[in-house]
Amino acid sequence: MITYKSATEIEAMRQSGRIAAAVLGELEPLIRPGIRTRDLDLYAEKRTRELGAAPAFKGYRGYPASVCISVNEEVIHGIPSGRILQEGDIVSLDFGVLYEGFYSDSALTAPVGRVSTEALALIAAAERSFAKGLEQMREGNRLSDVSAAIQASVESEGFSVIRQFVGHGIGRALHEEPQVPNFGAPGRGPRIKPGMTLAIEPMIAAGTYEVEILEDGWTAVTRDHRLSAHYEHTVAMTENGPEILSARPGTRLPKEGPHA
């Protein structure tokens, strides 16, 4: 069952989203060759608690860290460790916050130093596909219109969308209904209307969309070990259109309609 949020509840989610945005915004410039992924995680947890919130992922279904940090072919759920980021890597940070009883969820993929042309194109494609999906967040549209727009955008650039993992509703729970796939035909699923709050999160790959899970039980990697990128925001449908609740400075938006 989809839980539609009141204006008061969306305001609480907005505050949660601002904390997630602040912490991710502070993490991004720390991404550089030589830093350990564990150091990024420790920084995120410290700053989140300083801001009066809790990291949403730590302990969730047994996940051991505050940030999912996925490098290169890792799609999602990479576990921070002593791994040292190298020049030419790309790294995805997936981060959520619990504040005053409400969750927010956001992700970005960033280059580590100088990276390949393909890596830059993949990162940009993930961000563009999110924007294309957001354009379909219109009252009366159906949810799969968002999914179809993301898939069309990604595949038009020669990449693929991951099928095994999808976006989701969010609010008082980290994962609520409905699921938000990044693929599928338009015109299906529930109609979009005010009060709907979603984590829209394209996960895309340079090669195959097939994934496998590593022995740690968490980390999903592309089966062909080609690069993957992830981009995500918590979005609320309001009477005035969609609003990105986890927007950071520089968040890309469609040319018209949605606003941060």
Image (spheres, helix red, strand yellow):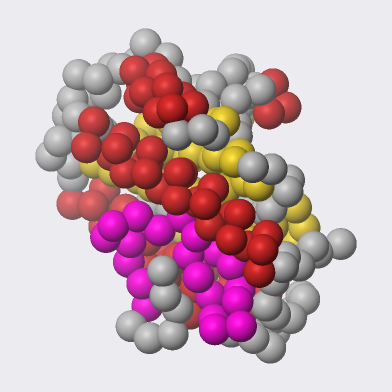
Position of residue 25 measured from the top left corner of the image (x, y, whole percent) = 31, 44
Q: Is residue 152 visible?
A: no
Q: How many marks?
A: 0
Instruction: Indicate left or right for 197 with 122 as reference.
Output: right
Quarter of the image with the N terminus in it: bottom right
Q: Between 75 and 39, which is closer to the camera in this rendering? A: 39
Residue 188, percent across and down?
A: 74, 79
Residue positioned most to the right: 1
Residue depicted at 54% across the width and 40% down the height:
96
Residue 13 locus on image (x, y percent)? 59, 55
User: Residue 192 vs residue 212: left or right?
Assistant: right
- 219 or 39: which is nearer to us? 39
In the rendered image of this protein, does residue 202 appear above or below residue 212? below
Say if residue 70 shows up in the picture: yes
Per the rendered image, the range of residues in magenta is: 233-254
Q: Is residue 121 magenta?
A: no
Q: Residue at (59%, 61%) from the top-left corner?
A: 11
Q: Quadrant of residue 199?
A: bottom right
- Pinpoint residue 144: horizontal percent, then vertical percent: 66, 74
Q: Quadrant of residue 113?
A: top left
- Name the residue at 18% across, 45% down: 116
Above or below — where is 197 with respect to 100? Answer: below
Instruction: Name above or below for residue 44 compared with residue 258.
Output: above
- Which residue is farthest left? 114
Q: Is 249 contained in the magenta span?
A: yes
Of 177 and 229, the residue lying toward us: 177
Residue name at image x 79 percent, y 62 percent: 3
- Is 212 rendered above or below residue 230? above
Q: Quadrant of the C terminus?
A: bottom left
